[in-house]
Image (tube, rainbow, N blue to C red):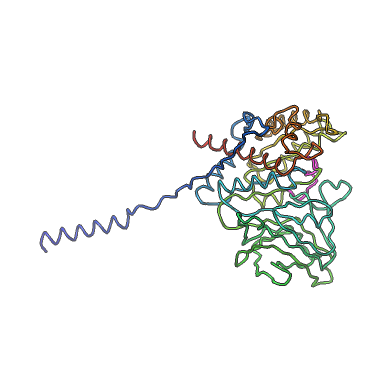
Amino acid sequence: MTLLHIAANYLAWFVTLFSVEFTPQPLIQKRPYLVAELDFTGKPVKLTQNVIKLNFGDELDMWLAQCDTGMSGDGKINIMHLGDSHIQADYLSGRMRELLQFSFGNGGRGLVFPYRAAGRTNTPDNYKLLVGGDWKGCKNVSYFKICDIGVNGIMVYTFDTSAYFYINPNTNPWLNYSFNHVKLFTKNTSGQFDYFIKKDSVTLIPVEATKRDSFFTELRFKEDQSVFGLSLARKDTLQREFNFFGASLENDTPGVLYHMAGINGAEYFSFLRCNLLGLQLRHLNPHLVIISLGTNEGFNPYYTDEDFKINASLLIDRIREAKPKVSILLTMPGESLQKRKYPIKRLNSVRKVLYEVAAEKHCAVWDLYEVMGGLGSMKRWHSKGLTAKDLVHYNAAGYRLQGELLYSALLTYYTQKRSN
């Protein structure tokens, strides 16, 4: 073999070696997150106060880390928002959902519930609901009823096998809330009716139960679905009823999954009555829990700082029992007026106690009262057409503005932390 052949063989071996062993692997690129451009010009707000407040500096670390993971195209950013009537309509939380999914991706619609089946109460206007049959309801503010209640703060039950409901989350043409799996919160006991998942009154959806325990079933579909329907049947004489606590509609796309659970009239104590809260939180696996409660404590004539501090602390403890390192953000109630004239002074005590609890329990704070502009702000918001007539609640525009402000505060905090 000539020296030329030897050199050629060596070169071929060298090229083969490096092409096999040292071929550069593609890097996992973080996709750039988007920040919605929001214009607060002319709005009755104090933007210098629109900040996330912390005591130790690490209160939102789990949420920050999961946002980074989501930007790498891996996994969900799960958020759970608990609240009262300011949240039940889903205007504030719905705007948050839209904006955070714009920034980090659409992970699905999240928790839905057939509110109308529970009686005379309002349903979020961002999904369509059809209910039939004889349903009864129980809420965490139904203080003279004893019932199993989960994280939604409300449940429905029926003894009627003809009962059904259909939920269509795809009412906004700009948002795709099709889903291919559902986290279903029901009782799974021998006394419960069989249930069938449908997309209309006739068509059954092929479904496989991949996980199951006494109050939870995870369902996976072979194809994406746009409507979630549930009907019932009795197949055994032991089956006498059906209990339903909510369903999370999810997809396999990385991004934000924003759950909302708001109950009219709810206080911190109300959610302590939710005996299934911890179990369901573990299945929902939140990285950030936002608690927007406190307004109704301001109207409670039996309110005391001591009792309120105990209730707020206990709720945070129960959330952390289910998810020990979860980030928790407490939002302070805004100004509310008694008889449309006088500020509810008790809300000052509520805010003071919540600041103490936040410091003791390692929670972040967003203070709506200060962001609104403090004393007299409710009348200023009313003059701008942002409130309801009672000057306690807001209209859709007012709640959506709050959602935009909270989103802006969170994204500003995230951007600052990640630019350091």
Residue 216: x and y, percent? 71, 58
Q: Does the magenta stretch include residue 281?
A: no
The tally of labels here is 0
Residue depicted at 75% across the width and 32% down the height: 378
Residue 343: x and y, percent? 80, 29
- The residue segment tinted magenta is 266-277
Relative to 278, residue 296 above or below: above
The foreground one among 323 and 69 is 69
Left or right of residue 334: residue 139 = right
Residue 399: x and y, percent? 71, 41
The foreground one among 219 and 46 is 46
Left or right of residue 315: residue 59 = left
Kindly tell me whether residue 268 is visible in this rendering.
no
Left or right of residue 29: residue 18 = left
Left or right of residue 85: residue 175 = left
Relative to 41, residue 171 above or below: below
Q: Does the magenta stretch include residue 270?
A: yes
Residue depicted at 66% across the width and 53% down the height: 110
